[in-house]
């Protein structure tokens, strides 16, 4: 079972991080940290298909649930990440209900959507235990455990959040606080009245529809605070920044 979904069903929070270094070895190292998942980012960095595929494989081997943030809403981009074995997709900059309907069509198999079928890595090329039970069992498992998570970071998404969260095929909402705060006219004022109201609205829509509420956090302290506010999953930091911070600390300690 998808580890994130399993934790959500048990009422346990999950934690992950963004991977932007384009390295399967980095992803493998993240598997030694106690994180639940890694979010392989193709929006803010140039990640080639071979790197994404290798990173997903490394995550699986290291015990991390691999998610991919895609960079556009097209059939090929959605299908490629899922065929590689991504256990979920994060979709940035969603503006409309129609965009999410298109995502569901591309990402979910019938009868929920119309995802294209081919024996690929996510089903063991047709030879894993579920795939051998037939397409009906395989389709059902993918529709249940492959997470589709639109990212709420625009005014358009926030204005339609109740309808989006209620859609069949949508498994949760990922809040991008940086871009959402900018869109709301309070850049990086994460505790402003407008932001707090927006976060409460997202959480309420998710809870009403039994969907997962994700949010990005800059630190472990912030993640703990968001968990206490009721968010189900906290994505803490980015591997690039963590690398810089770790080496800066070592250099500063040496030079002190």
Image (cartoon, rainbow, N blue to C red):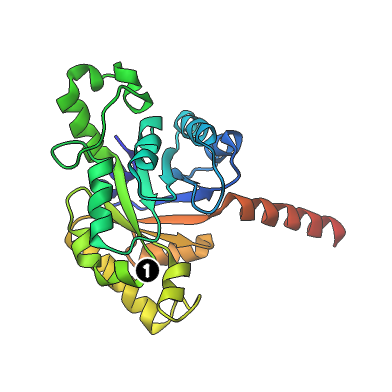
Q: Is residue 228 above or below residue 100?
A: below
What residue appears at the point 60 percent right and 37 percent down from the top-left corner? 23
Q: Quadrant of the C terminus?
A: bottom right
What residue appears at the point 46 percent right and 34 percent down from the top-left corner? 56
Q: Quadrant of the N terminus?
A: top left
Q: Is residue 87 above or below residue 220?
A: above
Residue 34 is situated, as x and y percent measured from the top left of the image, at 49, 43
Look at the numbered disc 1 and give the secondary structure of its residue. Answer: loop
Camera-nearest residue between 90 and 48: 48
> Could you say which quadrant of the image residue 87 lies in?
top left
Residue 250 is situated, as x and y percent measured from the top left of the image, at 76, 53
> Could you say which quadrant of the image residue 118 lies in?
top left
How crowded pointer 1 is (Cα within 10 Å; few <14, some 14-19, many 20+) is rated as many
Write down the residue under mark 1: 154
What residue appears at the point 23 percent right and 44 percent down from the top-left corner? 105
Q: Residue furthest left?
A: 111
Q: Residue furthest bottom?
A: 193
Viewer can see residue 86: no
Judged left or right of residue 5, residue 84 is right
Viewer can see residue 75: yes
Residue 153 is situated, as x and y percent measured from the top left of the image, at 39, 66
Residue 3 is situated, as x and y percent measured from the top left of the image, at 34, 40
Tally of marks: 1
What residue appears at the point 24 percent right and 21 percent down from the top-left corner? 131
Q: Residue furthest right?
A: 255
């Amino acid at each position: 079972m998808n580890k994130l979904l399993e934790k959500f069903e048990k009422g346990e929070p999950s934690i992950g991080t963004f991977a932007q270094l384009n390295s399967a070895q980095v992803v493998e190292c993240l598997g030694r940290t106690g994180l639940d998942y890694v979010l392989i980012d193709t929006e803010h960095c140039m990640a080639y298909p071979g790197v994404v595929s290798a990173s997903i494989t490394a995550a699986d081997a290291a015990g991390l649930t691999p998610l991919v943030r895609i960079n556009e809403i097209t059939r090929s981009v959605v299908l490629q990440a899922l065929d590689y074995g991504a256990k979920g997709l994060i979709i940035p900059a969603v503006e409309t209900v129609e965009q999410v309907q298109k995502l569901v069509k591309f990402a979910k198999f019938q009868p929920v959507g119309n995802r294209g079928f081919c024996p690929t890595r996510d089903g063991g090329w047709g030879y894993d235990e579920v795939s051998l039970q037939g397409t009906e069992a395989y389709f059902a498992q993918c529709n249940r455990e492959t997470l589709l998570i639109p990212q709420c970071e625009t005014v358009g998404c926030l204005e339609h959040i109740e309808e989006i969260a209620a859609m069949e095929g949508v498994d949760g909402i990922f809040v991008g606080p940086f871009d959402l705060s900018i869109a709301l006219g309070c850049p990086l004022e994460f505790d402003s009245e407008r932001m707090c109201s927006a976060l409460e609205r997202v959480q309420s829509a998710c809870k009403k529809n039994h969907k997962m509420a994700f949010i990005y956090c800059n630190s472990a302290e912030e993640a703990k605070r968001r968990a206490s506010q009721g968010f189900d999953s906290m994505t803490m930091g980015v591997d690039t920044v963590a690398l810089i911070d770790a080496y800066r600390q070592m250099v500063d300690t040496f030079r002190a």
